[in-house]
Amino acid sequence: MNSDNDGENLRKFATGLRNSVFMTQDTRSGRIYATEMGRDSLGDEVPPEEINVIEFGKFYGWPYCYDDSILDRSFSTSKEADDACASATSPFVKMQAHSAPLGIALIENSVFGDKLNNNLLVAFHGSWNRTVPTGYKVISIPVDENGNAGQPIDFISGWLTNDGTVVDRPVDIKTWDNVMYITGDKEGIVYRVTYSSQ
């Protein structure tokens, strides 16, 4: 929802989003990025988790479709649902299913090294019902000067051990005074991350 500056005249900004609870804005382009968790009960690899670029008036698929307008007949078989999916906005980035993406941050004017500059960082809270657990880490996604996303790579991991033990579950990412903070809600810890060129 958005409204006038005084809070009056509420209106829908974008629709078809599922569990998009964290977002960030690119100060260069004004783009709004939001993480989105896909639904359960379609298998270990479906549907992908998403980052969407949120734009006024756009429809992003939920609940009628996922991924690139793949129909989900669990919720509707109507022509209206088919038409809605045909015009649904595709994900900006697709990520490993059931990773539970929460916090998202765009690293601008980075003091964390050139490789991290203009990267999106996403906190994966971690799966709860996948056959083999996944997530429990922070990933990095480069965004180039034209606004195109590169491939996600691991930035910080280790909160899920090789034997499947969950050490912590990342939630959110913030930067302040050249320091990065990552919260974890399993242990109630705030992790402080700094950069060294050495």
Image (spheres, rainbow, N blue to C red):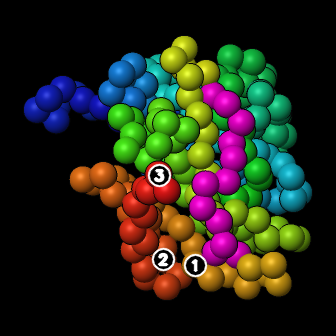
Question: What's under tag 3, amino acid-wise?
Answer: Ser
The N terminus is located in which quarter?
Answer: top left
Q: Which residue is mark 2?
A: 185
Q: Secondary structure at mark 1?
A: loop
* Sequence-earlier tag: 3 or 1: 1
Q: Quadrant of residue 196?
A: bottom left
Q: Residue furthest front?
A: 198
Give the spatial CA distance, label 3 vs label 1.
Answer: 27 Å
Disc 3 vs disc 1: which is toward the camera?
3
Give, as a three-letter code, the residue at label 1: Asp
> Which residue is label 1 attached to?
168
Q: Are marks 2 and 1 in contact (CB under 8 Å)?
A: yes
Is residue 100 inside the magenta stretch?
Answer: no
22 vs 11: above or below? below
Residue depth check, mark 2 versus mark 1: number of the one nearer the observer: 1
Crowd band around label 1 with a 10 angstrom C-alpha radius: few (<14), some (14–19), many (20+): many
Tell me which segment is drawn in magenta: 149-160
Is residue 108 among the parts visible in the rendering? Answer: yes
> Residue at the location (56% across, 22% down)?
144
Element type at mark 2: loop
Q: Position of residue 53 (x, y in %)?
A: 52, 28
